[in-house]
Amino acid sequence: MDTAEFRRRGKEMVDYVADYLENIEKRQVYPDVEPGYLRSLIPEEAPEQPETYEDVVKDIERVVMPGITHWHSPYFFAYFPTANSFPAILADMLSGAIGCVGFSWAASPACTELETVMLDWLGKMLNLPEEFLAGTKGKGGGVIQGTASEATLVALLAARCRMVKRILSDDPERPEADIISKLVAYSSDQAHSSVERAGLIGGVRMRKIPSDSKFSVRGEALRKVLEEDKAAGLIPFYFCATLGTTPSCAFDYITEIGPICNTEGIWMHIDAAYAGSAFICPEFRPLLDGVEFADSFNFNPHKWLLVNFDCSTMWVKNRTDIIAAFKMDPLYLKHDHQESGIHTLHTHTHTHTHSICHWQIPLGRRFRSLKIWFVFRMYGLRGLQDHIRKHVALAKEFEALVRVDERFQISAEVVLGLVCFRLKGSNDLNEALLKRINSARRIHLVPCQLSGRFVLRFAVCARTTESRHVQEAWAHITQLATELLRQVRDHP
Amino acid sequence: MDTAEFRRRGKEMVDYVADYLENIEKRQVYPDVEPGYLRSLIPEEAPEQPETYEDVVKDIERVVMPGITHWHSPYFFAYFPTANSFPAILADMLSGAIGCVGFSWAASPACTELETVMLDWLGKMLNLPEEFLAGTKGKGGGVIQGTASEATLVALLAARCRMVKRILSDDPERPEADIISKLVAYSSDQAHSSVERAGLIGGVRMRKIPSDSKFSVRGEALRKVLEEDKAAGLIPFYFCATLGTTPSCAFDYITEIGPICNTEGIWMHIDAAYAGSAFICPEFRPLLDGVEFADSFNFNPHKWLLVNFDCSTMWVKNRTDIIAAFKMDPLYLKHDHQESGIHTLHTHTHTHTHSICHWQIPLGRRFRSLKIWFVFRMYGLRGLQDHIRKHVALAKEFEALVRVDERFQISAEVVLGLVCFRLKGSNDLNEALLKRINSARRIHLVPCQLSGRFVLRFAVCARTTESRHVQEAWAHITQLATELLRQVRDHP
C-alpha cells in the first residue's frame, strides 16, 4: 500500500468508522457467536502473497463484527464505560503516524513533555493538592499508565521498596527476604481483583478489610486489623483505597483511613478507576476529600472522560519513591539531557533521570497524551462536565424507575452512573432474570455480588446513551421480569 | 464534534498523516528543543469552553512537531526499529472505533479469538514447534503483550509460581518466603535492562552469566554458575535467553542452554524482541533452533514486522503455568462461556477459564490483533520477508563501507540489521564522534558499550530506508570523523 492508496483507503475507513458509530444502535449489542466461531471463518495460515485491501475490508463485516460486543451501543450497560470520542480517534491516528516510542526524553521530547503538562492540566481540573503536580519545580507529578491494574501494582512495588529501605536503614543486617515475608498490603473486601493480583506479583501478603453496610471501608475497620497484624509481628506497608468500587461504586472513607496510614507509615494508594472522572465536577469533588493523605492516586480517563483506551492517569507525591523501585540505566538509554527528562529543570531532586520508563512496568510507550490534549481542548472542561452529569442523571432516572416498581429493590446507593438493583427474591430468581436479559440480546448487563446477594448492575456507558434508551431498557427488563415471575408462579 | 465533522476532519487527518510520512525525510530527524520547551508553548490549564478543531490542529506543527524525534525518517538509525505501516494504521483506526476492552471472551469474542488465531498464523510463519500453538486442542498458545518487558516479567512470575509449587509439593511445610528468598533467575550480561527489572519486581535474586567474546552465553558458562549456586543452597528457576541482544544483536546458544534448563527444571524464556521478526525468513530461522527447549518465547512484531506499537507476541508451551500465576475470578468477569474463552473447545485442561486477562499484567486490552491481520494479509509472507531482507542487506552494505575505511573497525558480527562500529582509538574519541553526529542532526544514532569499549550502533530502522540514505549517512559520518581526527591531531 503506497501513500496514494493510503489516502484513499484511509478516507474510506474514516467513513466506515463514522457509519459504524452513527448506526451502532441498530446492531445487536451482544453477539450470537459460540466460542471458536472465528477460526473456521478464516484460513489456517497467513497468505504467501499479498491480498488486496478489498479482500481485507470485506472481512470486517463477515468475520469481525459478528463477534463484537458493542461497547459503544447505547444499549450497552455492562461493566463500566470505556471511552470513545472523535477527537480521541483523530489524535490516535496522529499518534500512530508519528509512531515514536517515548521511553526517554530524547526518544521524543514532545511525547514526554506533553504528558507531564497534560497530567498537570488534569490534576488542576480535579483540584488535586499542589504536591501531586509536577509544575516546574514540584517533587510529584503524573504519568499515563496503561490500566489501573498497572498503577495499583506500580504503587505497591514502590511502597514495598520504600518500606524495605526504611527498615534496612534502622537495621542494615536484617535479610530483605525476612522483611518482605512480613509485609502486609490491605484493601477493601470490595476492591478490584487486580489489587489482590498486585500482591501476588509483588510476593506479599494481602489482607482484605471488611467493608461496612454501604460497602465502604471505615477507619475503625482498618485500625482493628492493623493492631492484630502488628501484634503478630507483621509489617503493614500498603493500603489500596477504592473510590467507586467495581461491584457497587462504593467509596472508602479516605478521610478516616488516610491519617491512619500517614501515622503508621503505610503507603495509601487511591484507585478511583471509574469514579475519578466525576471529580472534575465540583459537586462530586467532595468524594475525593482525603486525597491529601495519599501517596498516589489513579483513575482512568479511558473509562469516563472520553479519552479512548488506554489512558490510566496516575499521580504521586514523591516521584523518587517510584523511580527508586524501577531504576536501571543502560548506556543505550542515556542521553544528553539525562538530568531533565519528564520533569525538566529540577535541580533539587535526588534522582539522576526522570525518563518516564522508570515510572512503569513496560519500557516502551505510545504517544498517549495527544488524545488527552485533543479531547480536553475540543470538549473544554464544560463539555466534559456535561458528559459526566448526563450519565449521572440517566442513572438517577433509571433508579427512579426501579424504585417505583415494588417487585424490585435498589441494592446500593446510587452516587454516580451505576445502579445496582434486583428483584426482591432469591439469587436464583435474579440469575434467571439476568440470563433472560442477556439472552434476549437487546441490552447487555453484568452481575455482581453484594452481601451474598446476586445483584444486577446497570451502568450508563455509551457517550450517546439518552433517556429513551434507559426508558426502553427498563421497559424491556420489566417485561422479562413479568414473564419470569409468571412462569415461576405457574411452574414453581 | 459530530459525525459529519468527524468525516471531514478524519479525512484531513488522513492527508496530514500521508503528507507527514511522505515528506518525513525533509524534517530534521532529531529535534533542537531543550528540556522544558513545551510547557511555555501551551496554556497552564485546560480550556473552560471548547476550542475549534482548527485551533487544535494548527498546534501540531507549532507545539508537537518541533519536539519529535522522527523514528520513521530514513535518517533515523538509533535504538532498534519501531514498526509503522499503512495497513496497521488503518487497522488501529478500526480498533479505536470498535473500542472494546477484551479482558474476557464475552467482553468481545472476536477480540480474543482473532488474537489466538493470529498468534497461530505467526507461530507457523516462524515454524515454531507445534506445542506452542493453540490450534483447537493444544496446551500452548500465544498472546499479545504490550512490550517485551511485560513478557519477560510474566514468564518470570509464571516460573516463580511453578517452582514454588513444585517445592511445596515435596515439602508442604516449607515457608513460601524461604523458597522465594532462595530462588535465582539468570540472564546474559548482555541482556536488556528489563530482565533485571523483572527480577526486582518479582523479588528474586538475579545473576548475570558472562557472555563470550561474541557476546553470547554458552552452555558451559551457565553450567558453571548453576553449580556454584546450587552448592550455596540456592534454587535456580528461570533463565531469560536473548536472541539478538540490544547492544550488539548477539545470540545466546539456546541449543546448549536449553537442555541444561530442561534437566534442571529451569524455565527457559526466550527474548527475541528485535531479531524474532527475521525468523520468518528460512535463512535466519536457524538462529531460533533450540526454541523446542523453551517454556516461553517472545518477540516484537512492533519492532520489525510492520505492525505498529504496541504488539509484543508471546507463546507458551503450557498455558496453565501462566494462568496459575495470575488467576482471579470475580463475579463481574464471569460469563456463560467461562470454560472456553481464548482457547475454545478444550476440555482436557485443568483450568476453568482462558480469558486472556489471566495471561498478562493489565486486565483491560485493546483489539490489537486487527493490525496483525491487516498487515499480514496486505503484505503477505513474501512482502514481510522482503522487508526483513532489505534491512539486512542495507546493514551489510553499511558494514562493507566501514570495513574499507581503515580508520574504523567493526565491533560485533553483523547478523541482521544492526552494525556496531567505532573509530580505532579511545572511548573519548568515539564519544566525541557520536556527539558530533547527533549534534549535526542529519542522522541519529545511539551508542552501546561492548567489552568496555564505547561503540556506535547503526541500526536500519525506517520502512523507507534505501541504499542512498545509508550511503549518505556514511559519507556524513566519515566527513565528521575526518574533521574530528584533524582537530585532535592539530589540538591534541
Image (tube, coloured by chain):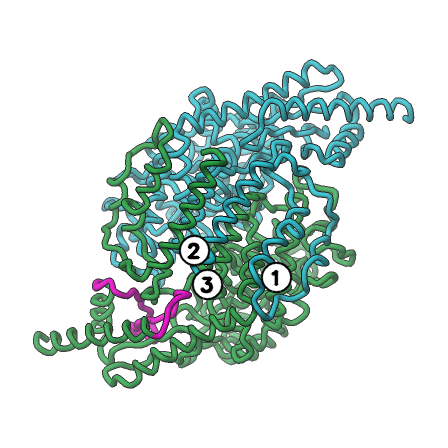
Chain colours: A cyan, B green
Toward which corner of the image does residue B180 lie, by quadrant? bottom right
The picture places residue A247, in percent across and down from the top left corner, at 62, 32
Toward which corner of the image does residue B114 lie, by quadrant? bottom right
Q: Mark 1 packing: few (<14 Cα in 10 Å), some, or many (20+)? A: many
Toward which corner of the image does residue A141 lie, by quadrant? top left
Residue designated by label 1? B119
Disc 3 marks a residue whose amino acid type is: Lys
Residue designated by label 3? B303
Left or right: B291 as drawn, with respect to B272: right
| Chain for disc number 2 | A
Q: Secondary structure at mark 2?
A: loop
The picture places residue B486, in percent across and down from the top left corner, at 12, 77
- Give me the C-alpha separation between circle 1 and circle 3: 16 Å
| Chain for disc number 3 | B
Q: Which residues are magenta?
A: B439-467
Q: Nearer the viewer, mark 1 or mark 2?
A: 1
Q: Nearer the viewer, mark 3 or mark 2?
A: 3
Residue designated by label 2? A364
Q: Mark 3 packing: few (<14 Cα in 10 Å), some, or many (20+)? A: many
Sequence-first disc among 1 and 3: 1
| Residue A247 drawn above or below residue B117 | above
